[in-house]
Amino acid sequence: MSDLEPSSNNLRKRLFEILEPAPESDLSSKIVDIALLVLILLNVIAVILETIPGWRKEYADYCDAFETFSLVVFSIEYFLRLWTCVESEEYSHSTKGRFKFALSPLALIDLLAILPFILHFIFPVDLRVIRILRFVRIFRVLKLYRYSKTLQLLGKVFSQKKEDLLLTLVFGFFFLIIASSLMFLLEREAQPKAFSSIPAAMWWGVATLTTVGYGDIYPVTPFGKALGSIIAIIGIGMFALPAGILASGFSEAMESRKNTATVCPHCGKDIDH
């Protein structure tokens, strides 16, 4: 038994290294990463193509075969990640570590990718429900986050700037309420159907503040037009705030990344960021 345990641990460690985003020197891991990336993209394309009328019916056998193959691959990947996650310091405990890993965002995305497959075999789900769950596959595109350093960096920026972003979101929500309330008071007599209530006016407020301007609802009174012009101008600046916060955070993260030491003090090799 003692001879088998080191062998099992070595296999688990190697599989963990292969499944994780690969350094340039690890060819096996690089091949697995590229293969999974291609499979994820093909799944997204398949979901898009299946919305074309008649496509699913004409190529049903090919679609089913590809879906089965994808689900098997993603299921194997998920359970291998669940088994090997204890090689990471964050999930080192054999039971608690795996449970913690299973609840992590990336693991939940992996689970979501194979959810139709699991439900189909565990529960007697109606076939109509299964067809609806097919569209859950579109969330497989989120698996790209695991392999993209740029997306990971952007995720860190969102995490670091979450308070600033939340503040702008709250400010925007309150401004929407104020703008919609004022427009309701100015336009309700002239347009009782379009501006029948504050919630109805909020649809106009969203379209105006985001500068989309659908044109289905718009002010007709002089004061309403004046207020609408002011709100549209303010909306340009208000919705530029989150973009500015993210651009600033991304710039700071890139600068910090450049300033980080790129050479390992122990082995002298370049550190793969």
Image (cartoon, helix red, strand yellow):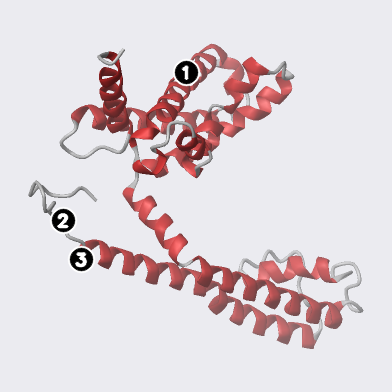
| Mark 3 residue type | Asn
Above or below, 7 relative to 157 = above
Is there a contact, CB below 8 Å, between mark 2 and mark 1? no
Label 2: state its secondary structure. loop
Mark 2 → mark 1, Cα distance in angstroms: 38 Å
Earlier along the polypeptide chain: callout 3 or callout 1?
1
Image quadrant occupied by the N terminus: top left
Disc number for residue 72: 1
Q: Marks 1 and 3: in contact by CB < 8 Å?
A: no
Q: Which mark is residue 39?
A: none
* Nearer to me, 66 or 85: 85
Give the residue displayed 54% in from the left and 26% down from the top.
Answer: 114
Specify the amino acid type for callout 2: Thr
Q: Nearer the viewer, residue 85 or 169?
A: 85
For discs 3 and 1, the disc positioned in front in the rendered view: 3
Instruction: Answer few, some or many: residues within 10 Å of disc 1's Cα (few below 14, many 20 plus, some between 14 and 19).
Output: some
Of marks 2 and 1, the one in the foreground: 2
User: Residue 19: x and y, percent?
Assistant: 33, 31
Q: Quadrant of residue 89?
A: top left
Question: In the rendering, at what x and y percent does residue 182 appear?
Answer: 79, 82
- Residue 259's tag is 3
Q: Residues within 10 Å of mark 2 (few under 14, many from 20)?
A: some
User: Where in the figure is residue 95, as x and y percent of width and height?
Assistant: 48, 32
Report the residue marked by disc 2: 262
For numbered disc 3, what is the local secondary structure?
Answer: helix
The foreground one among 26 and 102 is: 102
Instruction: Identify residue type, mark 1.
Output: Val
State the separation of the CA atoms marked 2 and 3.
9 Å
Q: Quadrant of residue 146?
A: top left
Q: Earlier in the sequence, mark 2 or mark 1?
A: 1
**From mark 3 to mark 1, how far is it between C-alphas?**
42 Å
